[in-house]
Image (cartoon, grey):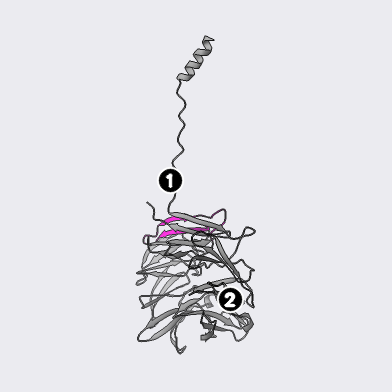
Amino acid sequence: MILLLTSLLWGACESDPVIPYPPVVVQDTIFEMVWATRMDYEKEIVSTDLTQHYKDWLLVGGDLGFPPTIMAFNKDTGAKDWEYIHEGAVHTDINVSYVFDHIYVGMSSDGIVGIDLDTQTALWEIDIHAMNMTAGYQFDEFENHLYFQAVWDLRGPNRTNKFIKLEPHTGNYETVYQTQNGVLNPPAFHVSEEFGVRIIFNEYPFSNGAPPPENVQNIICIDYETGEEIWRNDSITEFYRSNMLYNAVIYDNRIVITGGDWSIYAFDVLTGEQLWRYEFDYPWAVWTKTNHIIHKDRLYVNNSQFDLTCLNPETGELIWNNTDSPNCTRNMVYYEKEDFLVFTSWGYGSVLIVDALSGKTIHRERKYENSQYNNDVVYDAERDMFFTSSYKHAFGFRVHAPD
């Protein structure tokens, strides 16, 4: 008994072991997920990579093989407010889209539809396939109209590239310029009091399977009113053509800049004279993933590999190069509030945030619930929110500068 009491007293005198506090985890506040909504609980959605938004809604397209479809998610709550499924002659999934006023203009492989976003009803459709035309890959807005390209008689002897003006409220359209010389990339519009409106294209002659040295790339300038060729600069690239999907960009209304082979080229906007060329030291740079951005006195270019590069648009001088920032979608968002570039990053399936002034990678937000981010990021300035989607979810998020 004495031994037992002694043992109990000894044990009571011993201090209890100290339970360590859990390690302090610093929460990442750069990327703030506001909401994530599963788009379809039965399957993943492979949609057009162009994300659009309108008023209170984030707009996401339907899956491959669907008729033209719009899913509208509430920007504040993430709830799916409505879904539109088109019934008509145009019946394949939308791969290119644009929001003009209250109208969603969607292009598929067989035509174009105009959908009223306020009433969720079809306004018009254009059956391009019935006219023996193959639709292009982008809409461009200029002076209250949209412009797109289509190739007539693509596999026939008379194939013609048509540059078409579209009135988005009515669906009425007309051909502004056409050529049988080859395919054109989307336009750059140049406006001046002295010369009026001119359109600058990259021109890619029909190659008929020719080897790369014969696949030349030209740059041409056309008078908007007459279709007259003002100037051209032939065979601007050293070995092969590129930058076929996106516009040249114009700096200070004086310099037009475009990609080609592994280089970025700049030309006098009035004469076509080459002003500078910046050559990259990687083996190729097919400029097909992301359009170039001019912001103030800086040019941002993102090649088809891993580099995101900032150049001086006046001289072509290198400002910085980030070797780990590939983009998989068409656009980068310049976030004015923090001077960040925000975009969807190829290969990593992530949202990438890069300091636009230094080129430093600020944050990489990797896939969500094992599904990669794969569509364009868009920005709502009123809410100070970004939106995008993965194969599974639609997202609303905010971005904050690091402490």
**How far across and down, in percent of the image, does residue 31 sit?**
45, 55
**How far across and down, in percent of the image, does residue 360 sit?**
40, 57
User: Pointers 2 and 1 in contact (CB under 8 A)?
Assistant: no
Magenta residue span: 348-373
Q: Secondary structure at mark 1?
A: loop
Closest to the observer, 340 or 315 = 340
Q: Identify the residue under disc 1.
A: 26
**How far across and down, in percent of the image, does residue 391 sit?**
58, 60
Quarter of the rendering containing residue 188: bottom left
Q: Residue furthest front?
A: 119
Q: Identify the residue under disc 2.
A: 122
Q: Secondary structure at mark 2?
A: strand
Left or right: 42 in relation to 5: right
**How far across and down, in percent of the image, does residue 304 sit?**
50, 66
Q: Is residue 164 magenta?
A: no
Q: Is residue 240 visible?
A: no
